[in-house]
Image (spheres, rainbow, N blue to C red):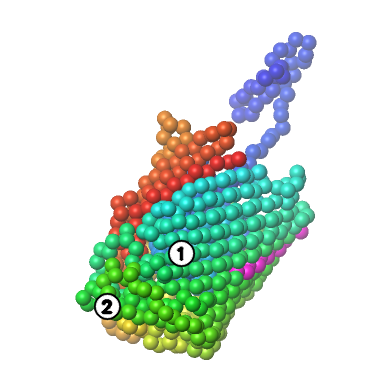
Amino acid sequence: AGTGLEVRKQEDGSYVLHYADTTGRTSADVTLPLMTVSTASLKQGTAEEGYRVSNVSGVGLWDERSLRDTPYSMSVVPSDLIENINAQNMEQIFKMNPLTQGEDINRHNGVPFVTIRGFQSNNPIYDGIPMADANGSAVSMVEIDRVEILSGTSGFLYGGGRVGGAVNYVTKSPTDVPLRRLTFGNYGGTQFYGHADIGGKFDDQGRFGYRANLLYQGGDTAIGEPVNQKVANIVLDGHLTDALYADVKYTYNDYRKEAPQPFFNSTGERTAIDTSKRYSPKWASNDIESHKAYTSLRWDPSKYFTLRSAFFYQNTRAKTNLVTLNQQVDRTFIPRISSGNPSQKYENYGGYIYLDTRFSTFAVDHKLTVGYSSTVIDQVAIDGSYWSGTNLSLSEIKNIPKPAWGEPSNVLSTYLGRYNNILIGDDITFNKQWSAMVGFNYATTMSRSTGFYGNGSKYEKSALTPTVSLLYKPIEEVTTYVSYMEALERGTVVGNTYTNYGQVFPPLVSKQYEVGAKYDINSNLLLSTALFRIEKANQFSNLATPLPTYIQDGLQVHNGVELVLTGKITDNLTIMGGGTLMDLSVEKANDPALEGKKPTNAASRMGKIYAEYALPWITGLSLTGGIYYTGERYADAANTDKIPNYTLYDIGARYTTRVLDKALTVRLNVINLTGKNYWQNAGYLGVPRTVAFSASMMF
């Protein structure tokens, strides 16, 4: 406006400027040079984009790459979705995700337990750095930018363990534009909280940035469990030169939960226990204090070389008073309670260094990566005492008086576990349609333990675990792949809660075969599916009382298919849904009674869908909800204790508007709408009906 110029669209799609008024001027048209517009710098995974993420931050030694061109089954949960469902912890995320079987979060001091493809995967990964053990991990939701869930064996990528899958917590980074956001809300019951998220750049050139997340939470859960949590997350980063980037991150987490629900070590039958009631005494508790520090560096001296490295350290102290119940024939329970006097100390540390080189052999392009990674857990505990009660009804458990524990023994139990990995991988591009990813990991696992961790046991084993993937793109929007991967897992050192305390099992080498396809239906909608087969040694507890025996016998074979659809169906409808179907069995067992049985705690069927609908006639208002089905499982190897299937329903709403010229978002979520009584796994009750809400304002 006001320039005297007009724009005309030409037949070939280009645009031409000319003078609207040619009086006294030339009539020559002016053609502007070609301009390319890219969305690469825009934030992925927003609610407006249907929570669709195009790239993953990296998978093992492979660097950041397209999600569609990654030959593994993956699902990404962005921060917008985490905030919009008022997720207090990963339990809500795992419940919603089609690839994961959600379980209890409170066990072992906040460890995010999850089952993927029928195998438990507990050891978290922070910014691509795997932890050697789950104990002391203390995942905090306010530090997470997004969660990348890999479904399937990840031994080559992250070293030992994680046979069924891996969960990578990508933490928050400084923002390119100033961020000032305050959130006040309630996680259910009287659990009110306040959260501040502040980020931006220090300088006008945008070379140095910062991010701070602060959380305070206090009150009772929906069933009267007092909770108190304080979290501080600080991030600094900088482009030290045009080719050199570095960051430093720190997180402090102080968490306490009183009267957490008991653990059911054995149940005579799976009766419908009312999950809306609390069954533990008020003096039972779960305390954890954690310090985490990260640092990473990336150097790109030329277009042919990239050096990537990162280091992680976490120091955690934990104290627990947890109630374990053994059900009797008359449906009474014998409680067993561990002393909370001794504290446990966990140190998790690890890191990696990778060198990427790019070159071509004739018409074939290569991105060759070599590197080393290591991760260690060092934990120390003071031996405590246990108290066992008499037969009580379930309602009487919460009235147990606090036992007189006396002084701790001052006898130390120690455990040291380590995974070392020497890796080489080649990302090969033959042409626009064909590519391959080939790699080898010389993995070493080692453990050393004393006291109730393993009675002086030592262990070390190495193995070469390969992977190979072949990708084919019949059209630009579709990627198909076949892959093979192996994983080394250290032999279990049986702890003192079993009759065969101190026994060391032989190492495990698991194998996975997978065929998959990913289809970009449009820029905001991705459909992916995979067929897989996993073979792993079978390990289980026989659930005997008063102490069970831990057993390794036979081979777990999991055959299955997965399907996931994420993104916008229409401009107003967003979904994240899919399902998993598996055929599970135990084969080659020495005990004939185990042959053909189902592995424990693995649901063979899951179907889940979460949806949001933006009402077209009320700007800013979206209705949300989900339906989540988990099939039946078995709690024991003999398949006599069946955990019933269940279906959970969530509903909610979100409204976005402007108040005093500031963006305001109000969210409401009702979890387990029907108040369904269910078992999350063999030992833990489900989550009762919970109402959560929040309000976020930019300032």
Q: Which residue is mark 1?
A: 257
Give the amino acid at mark 2. Answer: Asn
Side of 116 where 459 appears, left or right: right
Q: Nearer the viewer, residue 571 or 621?
A: 621
Q: Quadrant of the C terminus?
A: top right
**Which SS type dominates the magenta stretch?**
strand
- First in residue order: circle 1 vs circle 2: 1
Q: Which mark is residue 664?
A: none
Task: Identify whether 670 is placed above or below 593.
Answer: above
Q: Tell me where residue 401 appears, x and y as whole percent.
A: 36, 73
| Picture residue at 28% right of the left edge, 61% below the top | 274
Q: Tell me where residue 570 appears, x and y as whole percent.
A: 43, 38
Using the rendered view, name the quadrant where residue 3 is placed: top right
Which stretch did the figure color magenta? 301-314
Q: Which residue is mark 2?
A: 391
Q: CA distance from mark 1 to mark 2?
A: 26 Å
Side of 517 where 419 appears, left or right: right
| Picture residue at 55% right of the left edge, 72% below the top | 317
Question: Is residue 310 found inside the magenta-colored segment of the image?
Answer: yes
Task: Identify whether 575 is placed above or below 533.
Answer: above
| Picture residue at 27% right of the left edge, 77% below the top | 391
Question: Is residue 581 found inside the magenta-colored segment of the image?
Answer: no
